[in-house]
Image (cartoon, helix red, strand yellow):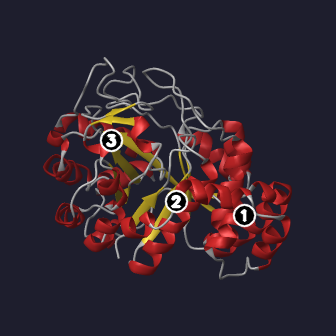
Amino acid sequence: MNFVETWKTYDFGQTAARIAERTDADVRRALRCAAGGLTMDDLEALLSPAAAPFLEEMAQISHRLTVERFGRTMQMYAPLYLSNVCSNICTYCGFSARNRIARRILTDDEIRIEGDALRKMGFEHVLLVTGEVRHVGSDYLAHALRLLRPKFASLSMEVQPMDTPDYAALAQTGLSAVMVYQETYDAAAYPRFHLKGSKMDMAYRLGTPDRLGRAGIKKIGLGPLFGLSDWRADAWFTGLHLRHLERTYWRTRYSISFPRLRPHEGGEIRLTPFGERDLVQALCAFRIFSREVELSLSTRESGAFRDRAIQLGFTSMSAGSRTNPGGYAVAPGTLEQFAVDDARNPAEVAAMLRSAGYEPVWKDWDATYDGGAVDAGAAMAVC
């Protein structure tokens, strides 16, 4: 069954109401089950207001489970923005088609220059990002993968949703993982933020992870944009989505991100509250809910918060991020999709991790796993 069919059987508002009604006893029962076998009801309890007094206990359990499964390591990655051209009008995004900004699609030489800049910083895992527009589609992305594959051990994407054959072809070109964020699972709220373009089709976006699973993509990333609707219900639906995928495409790995809205080009929009304490609760709830899922922390958050949060359950984090095409070397001063908060360079973040007793890991898996090979000269330059 496609997740869209499962999603249709639940009402977002009723789900939010159930979560709000959870009790201390529900939370205690969920924590007793932390050794394994949590249900969707348990996830409701861990996301509920009733769980707030238990946050310290949740953090300790989350830390323990993470160290048991992943050790004291942190996977490092960086986004590489290939284009800010977009045909969608999304009220929360600096790349929205109605924003009057300079648009850019990186050329072959510019892609190589940006890749070389990231490689010199030490990265072997890069996330390719674009706006959503037809002429930056599967052909352009396949070509970018071929240009970058010799430089990196692992290449991921956060781009427009595509069909299963497109994803299967990109996997053959060296694509390792795809992140596809639903923004919100609230059918009533979704149209308020997506005013024009292909992203208006909520059901097609909801079905993207299923298409990725059928295409055999090795890792699939999920996550809402917290603040667009009730964060607790959005997190619960993310958990429902994760459980569906884990049971249906069990050979695939999964990750969850926790993006919060940052300053961006365009007008301000009304948000529902989602503070740092809420983020910590969502993080710990997901780790207790799933020992295997990878949890990602972005540079949207402040350096002070990231320094503390690394011990709570995160397994990967970006560093030195630039959210504009060419932002590392080609055109550093151009408009970003959103403003990052932690502006430290990768070496500084790596030093922070080591001082906290963590080992920075610069690649997801070896290039040979995807049939590629890292350029020997580039590898020697980093050693």
Query: Disc 1 vs disc 3: which is toward the camera?
Result: 1
- The Cα atoms of the two marked residues, 2 and 1, are separated by 19 Å
Q: Is residue 250 visible?
A: no
Q: Amino acid at mark 3?
A: Asp
Dot 3 lies on which element? helix
Upstream in sequence: badge 3 or badge 2: 2
Q: Which mark is residue 46?
A: 1
Query: Disc 2 vs disc 1: which is toward the camera?
Result: 2
Upstream in sequence: badge 1 or badge 3: 1
- Return the x and y of residue 299 as percentages of the image width and height: 55, 39
Residue at 31 percent of width and 48 percent of height:
159
Drawn side of residue 142 relative to residue 238, left or right: left
Dot 2 lies on which element? loop
Q: Which mark is residue 11?
A: 2
Residue at 36 percent of width and 64 percent of height:
209
* Label 1 neighbour load within 10 Å: few <14, some 14-19, many 20+: many
Q: Is residue 27 visible?
A: yes
Drawn side of residue 59 relative to residue 42, left or right: right
- The Cα atoms of the two marked residues, 1 and 3, are separated by 43 Å
- Return the x and y of residue 161 as percentages of the image width and height: 28, 53
* Label 2 neighbour load within 10 Å: few <14, some 14-19, many 20+: some
Residue at 18 percent of width and 53 percent of height:
142
Q: Is residue 278 above or below residue 61?
A: above
Residue 333 found in image quarter: top left
Which of these two is toward me, 239 or 169? 239
Q: Which mark is residue 116?
A: 3
Q: Is residue 265 above or below residue 168?
A: above
Q: Amino acid at mark 2?
A: Asp
Dot 1 lies on which element? helix
Q: Amino acid at mark 1?
A: Leu
